[in-house]
Amino acid sequence: MSIVRSVALVTNPLSGHGKGALVAVEAVNRFAERGVQVTEIRGDSAAETERLVRKALADPDARPDAVVAAGGDGLTCVVLQALVGTGIPLGLIPGGTGNDLARELGVPDDTAAAVAAVLGGNTRTIDLGTVETDESGRAVWFATVTGTGLDARVTLRANDLRWPNGPMRYTVAALLELVGKLAVPYRIELTGSPDHPDGTVLERDAVMVAVGNTRTYGGGMLIAPDAVIDDGLLDVTVVGAMSRLEMVRLLPALSSGKRIDHPAMLQLKAREIRLTAPGAPATADGDPVGLLPALFRAGPGALDVLVP
């Protein structure tokens, strides 16, 4: 249990194509009504936002009782880079397109109720994941899912679309991406898997491979149905080679959050995964992190989150 008298409220006016800005204004007012000291953080870029969060947490005598992300999963991912390891809990005010971490933890969409959850002081310790591409050499924390291949290309395209609003944007982006090349050869190396010995290598053509800390992404798409957010493992979903028609048939079920059992799909669990595929992009919590090859690691108990 945490006592929250002051918060650093991190906002992104672009979250949810403007929803984040509206949510942030209401959140500030709600916190003020409860006598909570609010320091607003709004950077011009992800790097600037991360820097400002680090600055707010640098002085142990002045840092806030909680850092609150008023936006979506992408903003939360930016905050994580500065927050992990500080001992300060994260609060969530959903204001993005997907809000999958908030949904996973039962944080309500209603801003007033989300603020009440922050001030309730109830914390839950969760795992995170890291992804480090060979080209970047930097381990990036993520809370929900890192997608690769078609998965990542859909997310990147969805981020650029202005219509439709909400999760349907991902479905439209997927349909647009299906006109391109689908399967590419993947190499998957596993360490710390409960079902496979260390050093196991799987090689297969795949449309995409997703590495999940949570079950859903993209506004409720159930990509890792067996993922548990505090089991110390990451879940790997391999969508093997299939026709465009089969992919089109799968999209409605994925978008509606249904579990999919398909012969071309493979589910794995491991503490550490190395993925290699030619030209495959990767997106962590919906934001680009570079191209494969990449190393993924589970971070057990890495973060405390304020939950209802």
Image: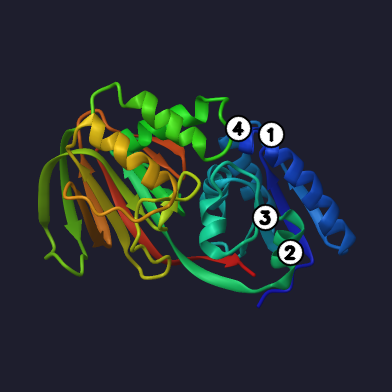
Determine whether 18 is above or below 299 in the image.
above
Q: Within 10 angstroms of label 4, few (less than 14), some, or many (20 or more) residues?
A: few
**Residue 41 circle label:** none
Residue under the point 77% across and 58% down: 112
Residue occupied by mark 1 = 18
**Which sits earlier in the primary sequence, circle 3 or circle 1?**
1
The quadrant the C terminus occupies is bottom right
Q: Could you tell me the amino acid type at mark 3? A: Val
Where is residue 186? Give x, y as percent. Answer: 17, 40
Residue pointed to by mark 4 = 45
Mark 3: few/some/many CA within 10 Å (<14, 14-19, 20+): many
The residue pinned by badge 3 equals 68
Q: CA distance from mark 3 to mark 1?
A: 18 Å
Q: Give the label, 2 or 3, closer to the camera.
A: 3
Q: Which comes before the other along the chain, label 2 or label 3? A: 2
Indicate the quadrant containing the N terminus: top left, top right, bottom left or bottom right. bottom right
Which mark is first along the chain, 1 or 4?
1
Real-space Cα separation, disc 4 to disc 2, in angstroms: 27 Å
Q: Amino acid at mark 4?
A: Ser
Look at the image and name its color scheme. Answer: rainbow
The x, y position of residue 296, in whole percent, is 30, 51
Label 1: how many residues lie within 10 Å, few (<14), some (14-19) or many (20+)? Answer: some
Which label's residue is closer to the chain start, 4 or 2? 4
Using a 10 Å C-alpha cutoff, classify the residue at mark 2 as few (fewer than 14 neighbours), some (14 to 19) or many (20 or more).
Answer: few
Q: Is residue 252 above or below residue 45?
A: below
Please say whether residue 145 is visible from this viewpoint: yes
The amino acid type of the residue labelled 1 equals Gly
In the picture, the disc for residue 61 is 2
Sequence-first disc among 3 and 4? 4
Q: Quadrant of residue 247?
A: top left
